[in-house]
Amino acid sequence: MPPHAIETYIKRVALLSSALVVFLPPAFLGLLETRALGTEIEIEARAKASLIEGFIVRNPDVWRFQHEHLKDILQTEVLPHTAATLIDSNENILAHVDSGVRGITLSRSAPVREFGEVVGHIRIRDDVNQIIAVSLLLAIACALLAAAMYWILRTVPLTALRDSHEQQRKEVERRTKVELELRSTQLQLADADRLESVGRLAAGVAHEVKNPLAIIRLGVDYLTHQAPAEDETYRAVLEDIRDAVGRADRIVKDLLNFSHTRAQVRTPLDLNAIVENALRLTSHDLNLRRIVVHRSTHERLPPFSGDGDQLLQVFINLIVNAAQAIEHDGKITVSTRSTRIATAPSSAAEGGPTQTDRAIVVAVQDTGPGLPSGAGDRIFEPFFTTKPVGEGTGLGLAVARNIVQWHGGTLVLHNNQNGGAIALVTLKAGTESDHEANSRC
């Protein structure tokens, strides 16, 4: 049964029980008292009818005219405060005694006989005001009791029901959360297993493919030197072969970089110099695409230590991605700046001041179409790519983010308000003492 149906049922039971408490005791008391009073005045009527019959026997034929004597007989009371009336067979009142009975009354009658023949009847009346008053007082007391009873019968079960329902809701939420966490863990384990398989596959591919690729490249270089200078077609074919071999070699390197963890060494770095080196290495591709590069570097960045080769790989990847997004005739803006990032509170006490650390931000902004809708964080998933087949492996950004995270930084990629996309690399800077220590190592 649904909880709302149970609540409705509890409310109805409480209301019915309270109504019974209000009406049954006063009604039962009034009924008993009225029946007892009716019995008493019926006895009174029979007693007076018997006295009248005795008087009739003593005064035959003239008893109807003895009004005072009949009245005296009626005044002989068994019950106090009752009104008595003697009525003949023609409904004529022969005698009447009024004791002040007013309001709501109860009456009983008894026949009067003359030598066995009914010649009239005695009617006795008494008021029930006292019974009504007592019943009303009892009804008020019962109403107060019923109100308390209704509150108890309604509130206590509903409170218990709602507490139980709340506990069940929390338990369902807890189990749902646990189930979601289990599913997430299962997916992470599946991804880890898949990446482990990729790592093993990449190692095998490296050994099986890199040597043939090196031989092919040596052969292409040899044929290029042997080719006639005037045969442009021959040289173009060899150049295409060299580009294909280079692309295959890059794919193998990406797989190895993603799956294999090599020894990483931190040394003092000049991030401006690394960014300039990345632009220099990608300048040929940028010139072919007619892409203008705008630099905006901070002259004095905070000291930073890291793996220069890996960070160079990150910036080359971001610049190449931006160029591929633009395709032709666009602009890439590369900037570096110093900033501060909030970290944990400087004291253990709650509400302590927030500590800020110096950081370096490297931004690569393009004028391309921007990220496709729905890409979100999937752009950092291994093998996820929005590029056409043959132009990307989907490993570049995944490898780049792993490198940045190893350096204790973050890599985010989102659409720019003015169009295009922007990649932000945030790296926590070291202190001057850290820089000097790394320099001595």
Image (tube, helix red, strand yellow):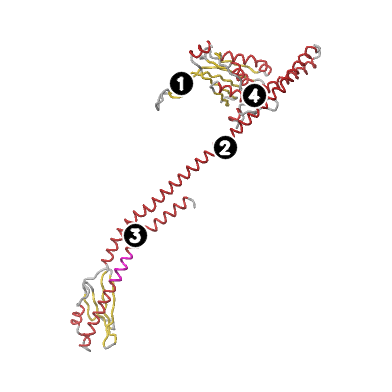
Label of residue 22 in the image: 3
Task: Say which amino acid is labelled 4.
Answer: Ala
Task: Say which amino acid is labelled 2.
Answer: Arg
Binning the other alpha carbons within 10 Å of mark 3 as few (below 14), some (14 to 19) or many (20 upward) gives many
Task: Say which amino acid is labelled 3.
Answer: Val
Looking at this view, is 69 or 6 the one in front? 6
Dominant SS type (magenta): helix
Decide whether residue 33 is among the magenta residues: yes
Residue picked out by circle 4: 325
Counting residues from the N terminus, which is met first, the one under dot 4 or under dot 1? 4
Secondary structure under tag 2 reads: helix
Residue picked out by circle 1: 356
Secondary structure under tag 4 reads: helix
Closest to the camera, between mark 3 and mark 2, is: 2
Binning the other alpha carbons within 10 Å of mark 1 as few (below 14), some (14 to 19) or many (20 upward) gives some
Binning the other alpha carbons within 10 Å of mark 2 as few (below 14), some (14 to 19) or many (20 upward) gives few
Closest to the camera, between mark 2 and mark 4, is: 2
Q: Residue 81: name its quadrant.
A: bottom left
